[in-house]
Image (cartoon, grey):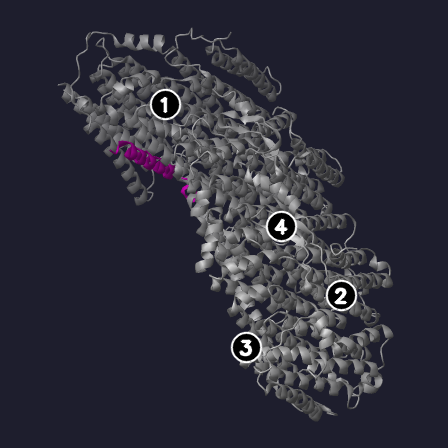
Amino acid sequence: MSTQTAPWIILFSPLAAAVLIFLIGRFSKTLSAGLAILSAATGCFLSWWLFRQTEVAPQLSLEWLNFGPELTITIGITLDHLSKVMLLVVTTISTLVFIYSTGYMRDEEGYTRFFAGLSLFLFSMLGIVLADNFVMMFIFWELVGVSSYILIGHYYSKDSAADAGKQAFIVNRIGDFGFMLGILLLWSATGTVAFSGLLSAIPGFEGAPVYLTVACVLVFMGTVGKSAQMPLHVWLPNSMEGPTPVSSLLHAATMVAAGVYMLARIFPILEVVPDAREIIAWVGGITCFCAALMATQQNDIKRILAYSTISQLGYMVLGIGVAPTSSEAMFHLFTHACFKCLLFLAAGSVMIAMHHETDMWHMGGLRKKTPVTMICFIAGMLALSGCPFTSGYFSKDLIIEWAVLKIPFLGWLAAAAAGLTAFYIFREFFVVFFGKARSEHAEHAHEQPVSMLVPMLILAVPALFAGLPMIQEHFFTLSHPDAHAVPHLLHPFLYAMFFGGAGLAALLYFKAEKDPVSIPLFANRLYIDDVYFWFVNKIQGGGSIVLSWADRWVVDLVIVQVPSKLTWACGFALRFLQIGSIQAYAFFFGAGVVGLLYIMLSK
Amino acid sequence: MQLALFWIFSILMLAFALGVVFLRNPVSSAMSLVMTFVALAAVFVTLDAFFIAVVQVLVYAGAVMVLFLFIIMLLDLRAEKHRKVRPSAWLGGGLVVGGFMAAISQVIAGWSALHQTKPELSDPSFNDVAGVGFTLFRDFNLPFQIIGVLLLVATVGVVLLSRKELK
Amino acid sequence: MPTLAHYLLVSGLLFSLGLAGVLLRRNILIIFMGLELMLNAANLSLVAFSRFNLLPNGLPNYNAQVLVFFIITVAAAEVAVGLAIIVALFRAKQTTHVEDLNTLKF
Amino acid sequence: MSTVSPLLFLILIPLVAAVLVMLGGKSRTVSLFASASNLILLLVLATKFRPSEAGFQFVSSFPVVPQLGINFILGADGLSFVMLFLSTAVTLAAVAVARPPVENDRWFYISLLMISAGVIGAFASVDVFLFYMFHELALIPTFLLIGIWGSGDRQAAAWKATIYLATGSFVLLLGLIGLYLLQPLGDRSFDLRHIIQLAETGLIPDNPIVYLLLLFGFGTLVSLFPFHTWAPQAYASAPAPAAMLHAGVLKKFGLYGLIRICAPVFPESIQALLPLLLVLIVGNILYVGYVTIAQRKLDTMLGYSSVMHMGYIFLGFAALNVVSLTGASLMLLSHGLTVALLFALCGEIRERTGTLEFSELGGIARATPRLGLAFGFAAMASVGLPGFIGFASELMVFFGAFVGQPTEMRGQTAAAAEVFRFNSIQIVTICAVWGIVISAIYMLRAYRKIFMGPLPERWSRLPDLAGLPRVAVVLLIGVMLFYGFFPQLLVNLVTPALLQP
Amino acid sequence: MIDPVFLEVSVVVLGIFLLMAEAFGLAKEKSTLAWWAIGGLAAVFIGTFFIGPNSNSFEVSGFYVVDGLSLFFKRFVLISTILVLVMSVDYLPIVQRLVPAERPGAGSGEFFILPVFTCAGLMWMVSATDFIMIFCALELVTISFYIQVAYLRRSMSSLEAGTKYLILGALSTGFLVYGITWFFGATGQTNLVAIREVLPLIPVANHPAILFGLALVLVALGFKIAAVPFQFWVPDVYQGAPTPVTAYLAVASKAAGFLVLIRVLEPFFTVPSFQNKLFLALVLLALLTLVFGNLAAIPQTNFKRLLGYSSIAHAGYLLMGLAAIGDAFAGGAVVFYLSGYLLMTFLAFLILVPVTKASGGDDIAHFNGLARRSPGLALAMLIAAASLAGVPFTVGFFGKFFIFEAAMNQGLYLLVLAGIVTVASGFYYYFKVIRAMYWQPAPEDAGPVAITKTSSVAIFILAMLILILGVYPQLLIGMLP
């Protein structure tokens, strides 16, 4: 095993697994699950092994397209600290989720299809992580999109799931539109798409700030789509239609983080363009706050977590925008992956217990029925809400500190969002686990099998402790702002926010029978979905119908109908000259003679 | 003298031609046509084309006209009833004929060589029957044969076409 | 002395009259007579041309007169065939009016 | 030169098969056998092909009208090989997918074989005139196929397409005559090699009118906006094999011609008239794209989508550099395979349900999972998902088009970076990139409406994809995936042909 | 070696022999006459290949030329006549039904004999180089056609067609004669060879007279070749005449007319002052003919009438080639087009005859479902229609191509532009027949179409020739003079 071959094995073993499951998976459920887990575990093991290697051999790359110096696109590997850490996150969490899935999906239809999809996803995600150039990243970016589409639409017979998958794909495509243009712009300026080449070429481009800013913002559009930033965030809550492991793995822990990872990957370029970073910061900050607001009024346990994810991704993007290195955002990505994945797994566990009921107002009192799940949920909850000394506390506060320093408004906004975070997650906690059982299912809920609990318990550990300095320093080299520069009020404010949020939630929802608060603006997601719905149906749909009509009745009319009908009519009219009367013929004949004579005799 | 003769016969000819075109009774038209042919034969004479003049009278006035009259009688054609005169036809016909005449006059008027008088023949006593005959049988032998075939075909055709329908 | 122009003019008038007969009359027989007039007009011009443009030997160009001879023959044949058709037509339809011949059109 | 080119057999096999069918051979067996052996023959030839050598190989020449420089010249270079592969593969798939009609199946297969012979002949011709003639061989079979065995408003569609295409190809013929007459007197020929050689030495004046004739002639055949209205209707009405062959292969003729003939001969005119072409391309991609979104039936939607995708290829042609032209050429293949697959599946659906209205269908993936899977592959290939050849070619077109035409390539973009102003072709490229969103919208919507959602009772007992059609579908998907993973194989084949024809 | 004059003489002798045979009842079956005629004409056709090189021993040099062109057209005419006779055999039942007869079969023998005389006339016509000769041969042809068109005396449409052809034909004869007169007056010549020689020497004052004569001759020949506006007889006569006669008119008469036109116009193309006027006139005629023929054909529903309009349309293309005569290849293009036109038109008519007999009419609708009734016949018709429309791999395509090539080379862009519309229309109306045959269902209880062996052999040969020449036109081009 060498550092040269290991990444390739990591990358392609899930693909091999996916293909094998596709081909022979239908013979045995166990076999498919086993193949998937085996491939993920191999990746996990090799990732840890790679992480331990300090010396990295130069990486191979395969030629995918080659037009000489003009344009050469390779499939190659970047193996630096960033990708190693990301590999760890992805493979480890994947392995856990895969194991969890064997339990979660045990009674579901499309078992093999599900594992094939998961493996395909893993392959795609690893491709993004390992990509050494923009095009390769784009390729896997798209593949991640399609695997997400497949997995969200797992229950394709359900209208909502089918719609959600479609929406996810299309919204991602809109992001990819910008991404592709960004790649084109960067390439046309530098003649290369390789990250290494770009990094060496960009400093020479400082003279064209606008161009580069536009390019970077366009690339960032890819992040906006994939990491569900405002205004392209709408797909993520809907994607909760997929099976919960999918939500956990793709739509919380890894795939949505790909956008942030990509920004981290091109961070050296972003450093050259402060304007772009400012835009990124604003998008992240606003997303982080607004998504938190929306989360406060959701009733679906997974949707709350989904908005929470959006909000947390907002933090990461904000981190990219304000922090001096990419490590801070990556640190939050890392911790978030652990605790959000955990939270989703716990939610999944609750759902299984509740027979796929997701409205939390039908739950209640589950603390006794599913105690292990509750413990895990608490671990995740604390980390998410930034309870001091949990992982989330370290990573989130670091970003907020930098934000306050760089763009104070966004910093304070993010800090306020932290309070909202505490509020909505505690709200969910209390409603689900406390109070009386509010439905039949809730009364007969029961704890889940070991295959689901073990991964949760394993994840609970990093969720709580991954942020501790002695652990984090193994993974990240973080830069902390000068302690004096940070406003003194900030930390007390953050503590206040945490306790305030949690306390308020306890006050309102501990033993609440139904929601005592109703803010339609938040419940309806700031009406953004409605605006989109209106736009897609009325503007785009209407517009395209008008165009379709125009194609049939204007273009076709002008280009085809009118000339052909005109020709026909001319023919129809002309044949009336052929009137059948000899005298008329003789007259025309004579007229022809006179006409010809006129032509011949005129000067 | 020649001019006078020319004008007399020409005007006669044209007048009868007018009669052909405008008389309502087919028999009158046919009679006018005979007179036109005869007048034309006279004009031929003023051009020293005696043989042609004779042929004109024999063939046209003799044979063709008999045929015409015979058919008119056979079909028992009467004068046209007062069918409505179609102004459009008359206008159109008039325009075409007028245009044609204008074209001819333009050509004639613009062609100065036409205004010479008749040149004298080198041998006024030359027998034009011999001239035509020699030319016809020596130089124009092949067309003459063709005309023969043509007459044969016409004969066959007439026989075929006038076969009586047996009821 | 009449000039060539005179003859040609008369011939042109005769031709035009024939044409007018074709264009204006509705009886096929009369139309046929008009056609004969046109042929005769051509004959007149031909003979006039032959008489006015003498050959180098000082005699009329008899080629033209031979052509006149042919025209007369052809006209006779044409009249024979034509009248036969007209008779056949009359027998079938009891008419010699062109207006009644309009089943084939458009 | 005097030896007979093996390519001749590629043309003769379908023709002989057609004659055999006419004389009473078993139509389906004979057709299948002929198209399969054609594909095998082509693959054998491909092993003999030497991609490293520039120019045409397997050349044979036979004078047809030597006075006018028309010769029966067969030959193939990398690009033609790609197109020949497309033709034979799609033919085989089409014959395999075809359901023999109840009545007159003989003529059905004869028509298919004639179209096949026509396209193969066209792509194997080195003589431009012959190239044109072979293309027209498909005219009458298409007319018959749509008119007799089509569905919906088939007669109107067949009429329209036939007259439209006949008119377009007549304009094209005038363009080719123009091209011929532009050559110096006494040295005129329809031999493509001769024409390009003359163009390189500057002996053919770069005449914009002839270029326009060719553009609109070829353009009509490829459904260039606004001369596209024949296509959706015709493809919607055509029986699946006919639509496969026509949309998949025959339609590519026009673009192949543009790339082959116009690109080397009329670079200046293309440059000068670029704005016009670009406007039409935007029409093809955005306008037709949105029209596609509005469609409520799978067949018309596919028809429009195939019109829309032509816009990308035109874009690749308009940019006129090696990357974009290669992309365009590869897209000929990728779109051909994709659209053939889509129409095949569309036919399979129609065969089962008798309707293609979105509103009447739904959820049938549950009843026919294999069909659903295959359509999923096809839809993804169509929206340009990586892994399929379509993505690679789209990518090349975008990259190639974005730097614009070769003259302004490197230096000007650097300058553009300074002042940051997009040139026209870049703006159109941006529109084209937006096209991938549009195609995702309509393709996924179609998939959603037909295969996803609850399964109505009446569709619950549909038979799944099986037998020969299944093999054909797998074959097509396999080819698309293979070249999607290894596009460089095709690039190596095609680029020499574009650089030095 | 055979003296060329004997070609026509033997045809005439053949005709007279047949007349005698008919009169004396030598042939029991009337169709025997047709076989004799076909045999005789075939012998003459073979004889055309044994023409001695300098065999103008007869005193005919001024009127009669035997060059490659005329020889080619003599063969053309002979083949046409043979095909017409083949068709006539198939058509005989209709003739016998529609001709009044005192005893069975009487009056139908001449239906096979008249074409032989017409053939002789046409053969003279294509060799004629003197206006007098042209006039005589032309009249022989015309008068025999009067008789043939009006042959079916029980059929009103045949009589009506005959009358129309008679009146308008005589009118055009009148113009022809008057035109010749003026020619003669202005040049003193009737011989085209002589005219070509004296033309450059003629004083400018005579030019209007020559142009006047030229215009009238053009009118008369335009009548023969169906050029607009002298085409009015065409659809009516084509529809009304017996089908073989229509085919004969459409092909042989038109071809001979074109050849005469080429011969007559040729001297004038060498003199610039005439050339421009003539060019203008030809372009205008071609334009009108193209547009009228093609457009007016679009709404037609009767196939024979459609072929009439199509004949006008093809005259338009041919005139276009004539207008482009300056191009080195244009003459060849016209001749090639005519030859292709012979093949495809005869093919269409040969199929029309049995179909008319079987379905009782000659509308396009009578072709409905032919593909199911008689697939072979339908395929042949498909080939004919494709060729008439100009689909590649048929001879019609090459014909159009050569014409348009020449026209573009000569810069006749107006005509080329009109060509776009007309070619498209052509596709439309020819494909209507294909549609009827293949798309429409056959009428109930309609069996296969009965057809004589000879006709089917002729159909097969013509269809094959159309395809072969569509693939390898050099075969014919090599034979062109």
User: Which one is in front in this view, the residue at disc 3 or the one at disc 1?
Assistant: 3
Chain bearing mark 4: D
Local secondary structure at mark 3: helix
Q: Is residue A533 left or right of residue D197?
A: right
Q: Secondary structure at mark 2?
A: helix
For marks 2 and 1, give the one nearer the viewer.
2
Tell me the chief SS of the magenta region. Answer: helix
Q: Tell me the quadrant of the picture where the C terminus of chain A can be found.
A: top left
- For the residue pair A208 and D220, the one nearer the viewer reads as A208
The reply to whether label 3 and label 1 mark residues of one chain is: no
The earlier-in-sequence mark between 3 and 2 is: 2
Mark 1 closeness class: few <14, some 14–19, many ≥20 residues within 10 Å: some
Q: Residues within 10 Å of mark 3 (few under 14, many from 20)?
A: some
User: Secondary structure under badge 1?
Assistant: helix
Instruction: Please state the extent of the stretch shown in magenta in the rendering.
Output: A575-603
Residue E257 point in image, percent of width and height: 42, 26
Distance from the alpha carbon under mark 2 to that under mark 1: 91 Å
- Residue that badge 1 annotates: E266
Q: Write down the residue under mark 3.
A: A406
Cα–Cα gap, marks 4 and 2: 36 Å
Q: Position of residue D74 (x, y in %)?
A: 60, 32
Q: Is residue A182 magenta?
A: no
Which residue carries the number 4 mark? D335
Please indicate, yes or no, whether residue E236 appears anywhere in the rendered image.
no
Which amino acid is tagged 3? Lys
